[in-house]
Amino acid sequence: MRAHAGKELKTIDQISAGGAVIRKTGATAEVVIVQIVPEMRWQLPKGIIDPGETPEIAAVREVREEAGIDAEIIEPLETISYWFTVNRDGEATRIHKSVHFFLMKFLGGNVADHDHEVAESRWVSVDEALRMLAFKSERGVVEKAAVQIG
């Protein structure tokens, strides 16, 4: 625990999984991104791994729930870690989050079929994703995915 304004902070580890789903339309590679609520920021689909799930199973589930599409894993891309603080029950809590990202192949579905945690899900070019994504670490994941796809 670390001091925060003279007070020790509770720290929680969170492990999530998600995907960079890439599809080729002609010569253009597109990636699916989601705008989450209430923050209204663009990010890759991802979420907490449920008890009994592997990172792979969680990544496929989260892509289905948040982006509205079905995808399969091609290979692991990267695991990113970061810290942030949230207010839980009136108490500041530090979260150490690790996210396992996978390169994924689009199988089917419609980005309009996303769940309530998402305001919008859409296909964008890799360049558009690099401009729109809120987090530098996720932009790095997309860059790595684009290189893998070719």
Image: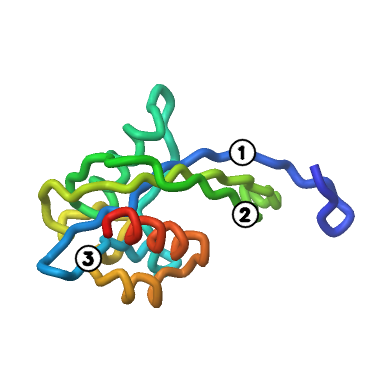
- According to the image, label 2 marks what residue? 86
User: What amino acid type should be assigned to the residue bearing mark 3?
Assistant: Ala
Secondary structure beneath dot 2 equals strand
Cα distance between the residues tagged 1 and 2: 13 Å
Residue closest to the far front: 150
Identify the residue at image location x=18%, y=58%: 23
User: What amino acid type should be assigned to the residue bearing mark 2?
Assistant: Val
Which of pointers 3 and 1 indicates the residue nearer the eye?
A: 3
Which of pointers 1 and 2 indicates the residue nearer the eye?
A: 1
Which coloring applies here? rainbow
Q: In which quarter of the image is residue 126?
A: bottom left
Estimate the x, y position of residue 17 in percent, counting from the top left.
Answer: 42, 42
Which of pointers 3 and 2 indicates the residue nearer the eye?
A: 3
- According to the image, label 1 marks what residue? 13
Q: Quadrant of residue 98?
A: top right
Estimate the x, y position of residue 100 in percent, counting from the top left.
Answer: 45, 42
Q: In which quarter of the image is the C terminus?
A: bottom left
Residue closest to the far top: 52
Answer with mark 3 or mark 2, whichever residue precedes in sequence.
Answer: 3
Q: Quadrant of residue 127?
A: bottom left
Cα distance between the residues tagged 3 and 1: 34 Å
Q: Is residue 6 left or right of residue 94?
A: right
- According to the image, label 3 marks what residue? 29
User: What amino acid type should be assigned to the residue bearing mark 1?
Assistant: Asp
Secondary structure beneath dot 3 equals strand
Cα distance between the residues tagged 3 and 2: 36 Å
Q: Residues within 10 Å of mark 1 (few under 14, many from 20)?
A: few
Estimate the x, y position of residue 13 in percent, counting from the top left.
Answer: 61, 38
